[in-house]
Image (spheres, rainbow, N blue to C red):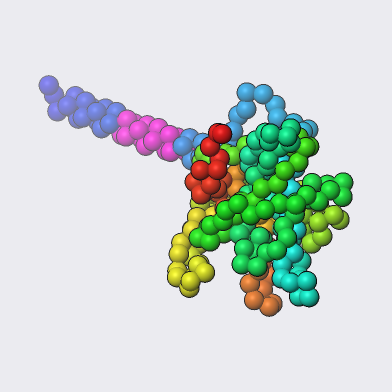
Amino acid sequence: MSKKKLMFVLGMCFLLISCLFISSCSIQQLFKNKIINEIENKYIEYSQTITVNDIEDALVQASEIAASSTVAIRVISGSIFTASESMGSGVIIKRSQNYNNTYRYLVVTNRHVTDTSSASDISVYIGNNQYIDAMLVSYDDDYDLALIAFDSGILLNVATLYTDTLVTGQYAIAIGSPYDIESFYNTVTIGSVSSPNRLIEEEDLYGKSVVHTFIQHDAAINSGNSGGGLYDIYGRLIGINTWKLVGDLGDHFEGLNFAIPASVVNQVFATYLKND
């Protein structure tokens, strides 16, 4: 082969290799851009259109179901001369038939609502100016939970405990009677789960440091909501509202609310929740 032809062949090979290198770089860049665009433009495709009305209907139905198993609680403590009145909320978690054709209801609430140390009179309010005498059945200081019972001939709904995994962002419906039982009975507020497993360190009644798991959410709660239910969009009980972060004077915390998971309720009162 002549020197001239050899130089021509080498030149063509160099040109071909250069083109392949440039093409490879371009393909890699295009692939990289495709990945970036897929990440930046990610969205959820639903098999059917979900309207605002669909969501609203679900929340309305869930609120109605949840409210039908939520009651208000009034506690009068102390003697006749030093009596004080406090209030809270509770959730019906079991119903059984009495021998006289009435029903025995078990209601879960917070221990601090029942004031177990000095409570002398506990009653539940089921609406329409109906207060029914109740009694303390059991309580747990560690988890701030209590169980009370009352009898009634009225058929009331029992909450469905949902003890499976929750996720951040799902709907959370709080129901309770803040400030005044009769005026604000079964007030409904709606928010979302901020964290399904928030670990909080606190002191127990004996000053010992303990860590408990709470559901953090932003559905508004106030004094009187303690012991009331936190429900999901299906009307299932996912927690018992127990406290909110207020802070010191001058602090402005909003939406930092906490509920005891339904799984803890199920664990603490397992003996009482068994079928008769």
Number of numbered discs present?
0
Residue at (39, 35) in percent of width and height: 28
Q: Which residue: 28% across, 31% down?
A: 17
Residue 173 seen anywhere in this rendered image of the structure: no
Q: Percent position (x, y) of residue 145?
A: 58, 55
Q: Is residue 138 in sight in this rendering?
A: yes
Q: Position of residue 216 (x, y in %)?
A: 58, 54
The secondary structure making up most of the magenta span is helix
In the picture as drawn, the residue positioned furthest to the left comes out as 1
Q: Please give the range of residues in magenta.
A: 18-33
Q: Quadrant of the N terminus?
A: top left
Quarter holding residue 32:
top left
Q: Quadrant of residue 236?
A: top right
The residue lying at 62 percent from left, 63 percent from top is: 116
Image location of residue 248, percent across then percent down: 64, 76
Q: Nearer the viewer, residue 84 or 34?
A: 84
The image shows residue 24, relative to residue 184, as above or below, that is above
Point out the residue furthest to the front here. 100
Residue at image position (63%, 39%) is 94
User: In the image, is residue 179 part of the stretch drawn in magenta?
Assistant: no
Query: Which residue occupies the foreground of this view, 26 or 211?
Result: 211
Does 20 sit above or below residue 142? above
Image quarter in which the C terminus is found: top right
| Left or right of 128, for residue 30 | left
Q: Taking 117 as reference, is 268 above or below it?
A: above
Q: Is residue 31 magenta?
A: yes
Given residues 34 and 79, the one toward you in this image is 79
Query: Residue 46: x, y in percent?
Result: 62, 27
Residue farthest along the bottom direction in this orientation: 249
